[in-house]
Image (cartoon, rainbow, N blue to C red):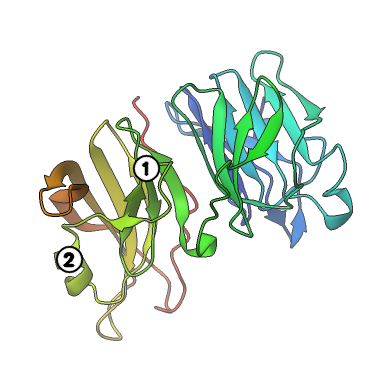
């Protein structure tokens, strides 16, 4: 890897390994790029990694079995039905190869994806809400057997997988949603009502787990008067679950441990958003 200056780009996808974070593809000067950079979390340096074979923006990436990064979609329309739709990066040989993927449909964009517990399968949904399961051993995408689709996939962002099998996503209006993979309907994580009322109309911009039951969220706090700066706020909480005896359904609760401002914009305009591209826990 060659050392490089940090260059956050829109449309990138991100993958974490034990050393740091890969930033894959995205838009540079409005055009898709094949560039890949790696952020070392231990010494806060950024290096150039081997570029992809195909320029991509809005792709989906997953680390499989801690050995290979699979990247799907995000290429131009004329490549959506070709063998160039997917490629894989081998962390040992640091090389990219195109992957011939068997799929009932070649979606241009996988809207959201999450690696399952066996570290060999990816559960994902495309831009039309079609649910897929990907097997790395068979290089095969399969649509959900029961024909389920995801409602409003554009409002179900940043999927995460918890140790107790639940899927989490970032909803609208400061909400965190959850469900099990075999369910269709998302439920709201309760306990964030105080933050939602205090920061009326706020939207969570990123969230992550940083241990088995603890979660962190980030959001923009809009200034209440002209001389105030736009602030990035952070809250951390523990997820607990309880069985609702009336409905016989599980409910999840957020027990907030801390919240406050962690960054203030130095921009002269309070309308300029704070651009947080990615958030992930990393032990260093």
In which quadrant will I find the C terminus?
A: top left
Closer to us: 249 or 83: 249
Element carrying mark 2: helix
Does residue 115 appear left or right of residue 53 in this picture? Answer: left
Does residue 272 appear left or right of residue 144 in this picture? Answer: left
For label 2, the crowd category at 10 Å Cα-Cα, with few meaning under 14, some 14 to 19 and many 20 or more, is few
Residue 161 placement: quadrant: top left
Residue 147 coordinates in the image, percent (x, y): 58, 49
In which quadrant will I find the N terminus?
A: top right
Residue 199 placement: quadrant: bottom left
Q: As drawn, which residue projects farthest toward the left?
A: 245
- Badge 2 is on which residue? 193
Residue 11 coordinates in the image, percent (x, y): 63, 54
Mark number displayed over residue 164: none
Residue 222, compared with residue 6, is above or below; it is below
Q: Residue sitting at 18 percent across and 73 percent down?
A: 197
- Badge 1 is on which residue? 180
Distance from the alpha carbon under mark 1 to that under mark 2 = 23 Å
Q: Is residue 38 visible?
A: no
Q: Is residue 250 visible?
A: yes
Does residue 62 appear left or right of residue 98 in this picture? Answer: left
């Amino acid at each position: 890897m060659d050392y490089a200056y940090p260059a956050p780009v829109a449309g990138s996808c991100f993958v974490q390994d034990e050393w740091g974070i890969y930033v894959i593809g995205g838009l540079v000067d409005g055009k898709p790029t094949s560039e890949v950079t790696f952020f070392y979390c231990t010494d806060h340096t950024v290096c150039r990694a081997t570029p992809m074979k195909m320029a991509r923006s809005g792709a989906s990436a997953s680390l499989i079995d801690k050995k290979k990064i699979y990247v799907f979609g995000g290429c131009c329309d004329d490549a959506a039905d070709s063998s160039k739709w997917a490629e894989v990066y081998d962390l040992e040989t640091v090389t990219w190869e195109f992957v011939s993927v068997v799929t009932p449909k070649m979606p241009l964009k996988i809207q959201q994806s999450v690696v399952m517990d066996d570290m060999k399968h990816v559960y994902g949904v495309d831009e039309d809400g079609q649910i897929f399961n990907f097997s790395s051993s068979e290089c095969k995408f399969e649509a959900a057997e029961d024909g389920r689709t995801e409602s409003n996939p554009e409002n179900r962002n940043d999927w995460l997988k918890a140790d107790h099998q639940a899927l989490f996503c970032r909803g609208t209006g400061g909400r965190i949603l959850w469900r099990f993979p075999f369910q269709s309907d998302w439920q709201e994580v309760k306990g964030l009502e105080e933050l939602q009322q205090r920061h009326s109309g706020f939207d969570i911009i990123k969230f992550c787990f940083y241990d088995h039951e603890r979660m962190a969220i980030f959001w923009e706090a809009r200034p209440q008067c002209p001389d105030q700066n736009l602030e990035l706020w952070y809250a951390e909480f523990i997820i607990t679950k309880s069985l609702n005896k009336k409905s016989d359904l599980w409910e999840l609760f957020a027990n907030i441990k801390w919240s406050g401002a962690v960054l203030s914009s130095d921009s002269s305009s309070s309308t300029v958003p704070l651009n947080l591209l990615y958030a992930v826990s990393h032990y260093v």
